[in-house]
Image (tube, helix red, strand yellow):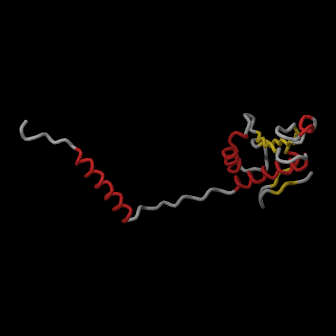
């Protein structure tokens, strides 16, 4: 029962990851139709006890289309020609995604616009108003 260390506080059990090998598309000669080298891993995000609620929410948002309706994260790796390399690649991509979800977003600091930026904005508005004002049709005195 090996553990995969994600961060100092998060580690997931390898038994929680289901690995399946499928046939890979693309070039590969005669082997492509015979050998299932592409790895597809599934990690149940909603049922995992290793993740906190905040990390789970961020992971669900980050993963996007990789999440199934049941809450499983599906990652496919078919970059390499061997099962082991593709399995390692898929697990590495999972750990990268989990590390990204584990880092909390930075809080936004409220700032006020500077005096110079306010004056630039007002100057451009004034110039634009002048240009539009010059286009106005004024009725002639003869009417």
Left or right of 122 in this view: 113 = right
Is 33 drawn above or below residue 101 in the view shown?
A: above
Q: Residue at x 78, y 41 (%)?
A: 74
Left or right of 45 in this view: 105 = left
Q: Quadrant of residue 71?
A: top right
Q: Position of residue 13 (x, y in %)?
A: 86, 50
Q: Residue at x 79, y 47 (%)?
A: 49
Q: Position of residue 86 (x, y in %)?
A: 86, 47
- Nearer to the camera, 105 or 123: 123
Left or right of 104 in this view: 134 = left
- Nearer to the camera, 111 or 22: 22
Q: Quadrant of residue 140?
A: top left
Is 132 drawn above or below residue 109 in the view shown?
A: above
Residue ranking furthest to the front: 29
Q: Residue at x 92, y 51 (%)?
A: 1
Q: Residue at x 91, y 47 (%)?
A: 82
Q: Position of residue 90 (x, y in %)?
A: 82, 48
Q: Quadrant of residue 136?
A: top left
Left or right of 129 in this view: 11 = right
Q: Position of residue 114 (x, y in %)?
A: 40, 64
């Amino acid at each position: 029962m090996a553990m995969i260390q994600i961060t100092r506080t998060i580690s997931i059990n390898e038994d929680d990851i289901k690995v399946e090998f499928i046939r890979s598309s693309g070039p590969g000669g005669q082997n492509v139709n015979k050998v299932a080298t592409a790895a597809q891993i599934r990690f149940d995000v909603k049922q995992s006890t290793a993740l906190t609620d905040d990390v789970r929410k961020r992971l669900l948002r980050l993963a996007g289309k990789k999440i199934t309706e049941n809450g499983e994260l599906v990652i496919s790796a078919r970059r390499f020609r061997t099962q082991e390399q593709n399995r390692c690649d898929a697990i590495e991509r999972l750990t990268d995604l989990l590390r990204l979800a584990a880092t909390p977003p930075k809080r936004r600091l409220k700032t006020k616009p500077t005096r110079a930026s306010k004056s630039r904005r007002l100057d451009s508005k004034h110039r634009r108003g002048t240009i539009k004002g010059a286009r106005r049709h004024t009725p002639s005195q003869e009417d």
